[in-house]
Amino acid sequence: MENATNVLQQINSFVWGPPLLILLVGTGIYLTLRLGLIQVFKLPLALRYLFSKDPDDKDGQGDVSSFAALCTALAATIGTGNIVGVATAIKVGGPGALFWMWLAGFFGMATKYAECLLSVKYRVVDENGEMSGGPMYYIERGLGNKWLAKAFAFFGIGVALFGIGTFAQINSITEAVNLTFNVPILATAIIITVLVALITLGGIKSISKAAEIIVPFMTVFYVASSIMILGLNIEALPSTIILVVKSAFTPTAATGGFLGASVMLAIRSGVARGVFSNESGLGSAPIATAAAKTNSCVKQGLISMTGTFFDTIIVCTMTGLILIMTGQWQGNYAGASMTNMAFKQGLGGWGSYIVTIGLIFFAFTTILGWNYYGERCTEYLFGVKGIKPYRYIFILLVSVGAFLKLDLIWILADIVNGLMALPNLIALIGLRHVVNNETKIYFQQLKEKSKAKLSKTISSVNEI
């Protein structure tokens, strides 16, 4: 078993080595430049689209609202990575890792925009009358490469069933509840399994309804608690931000329980954890995006782009600043325990409860989101007849996940996750002209509509 673990660890290091990270970030940089810094100049418009209702979208194709589709994607994205992943990145790479996490998130917004645009453009209606989309469809219908599309779907099912979607999340929930509230692992596992079954058997509409309630609540709850800690330590905020920026470009010396880190280690830790957290480029979010009720692939791409903004630029930033501000990154704790101690230091005993509750909600919604991703990948490979068996297998794996050792499973999940990203990135590069053309046409039409509206207003005023 130890030999197998070592071999898989070497494969994992290769898959998630510099080539894939460079490809992920490089794709984001290219799309950012090609689309004219869309994540900067069009973010206000994207946020306006997100928080306002467009009457035209009622007649659009799709199963759920644009907001519900985004919440479903965020359900899978905002997860343990925002608590555990950020702590891991800073523990390994030092405060500078947070800066590189910001950079990965910034360029990742352009990547998320492009992949979600393509998802809506190339989506199809399945035999059940529901929308199906994602990288497997734009790889097949856009690139014309069916075997690459099947490879993505295969790896997607692997991640959903044996990695991020089940074992890691249920383990995080049961252990956190046991440690903080002293609830037996078996009891928590049964409750979570029943809740997952009740929600996931209802399909995308049931999942999106749960996500619409849980995701905004858990995000506001966690961010509000974080802002409280930052507010109580406001005098330390400027020096914390300076340390983050300085450490991004200079080695961080060993202090306390921190072993020290080079600039290269800070970059690798920040970028890798940032990508794991916001999933930009991995091809997961476009699967949920395809279900959105909309008439415009560009508009939905803009709305989906805000997911990376919320996940990395807001939630991960809150966690990172608190870890650095409280000095816990220099202590002997790691992962969830490190974040737990930082919040406890900032808010007293209540801090532990906040992290635990956040971890429960984050992990639970990740289970729901990845259930849907795996379901769509299953349907692509086996048709709608494969959906029900997949759901039952998924629920079964959730029920046993709390009692498994995760060392080997985490490595396998990382490998399949990385392999899932490759077909998607190839598609984004191959379909870059489609993304650019759709974007140009949309904003040209928007400009013409604005001119026509202004002209009509002026005419009305002149008549008066």
Image (cartoon, rainbow, N blue to C red):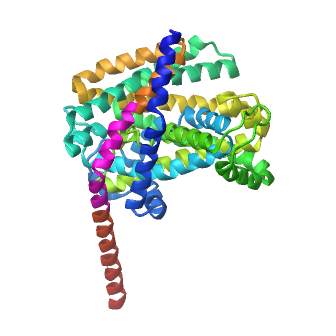
Quadrant of the image containing the C terminus: bottom left
Residue 123 shows in the view:
yes
Residue 296 shows in the view:
no
Residue 112, compared with residue 380, is above or below; it is below
Q: Which residue is drawn at 24% across and 27% down?
A: 381
Q: Which residue is drawn at 58% across and 44% down?
A: 267
In terms of depth relative to the viewer, which is nearer, 318 or 436?
436
Report the span colored magenta. Answer: 419-439
Residue 446, compared with residue 309, is above or below; it is below
Q: Which residue is drawn at 41% across and 64% down?
A: 36
Report the predominant secondary structure element of the magenta stretch: helix
Q: Which quarter of the figure has residue 439? A: bottom left
Q: Residue at x 79, y 49 (%)?
A: 233
Residue 242, given in percent of the width and then of the height, sits at 72, 54
In terms of depth relative to the viewer, which is nearer, 147 or 84?
147
Q: Which quarter of the figure has residue 403? A: top right
User: For this view, does 161 lie left or right of residue 340?
Assistant: left
Magenta-span inclusion, residue 308: no
User: For this view, does 419 lie left or right of residue 277?
Assistant: left
Residue 251, given in percent of the width and then of the height, sits at 69, 45
In terms of depth relative to the viewer, which is nearer, 215 or 213?
215
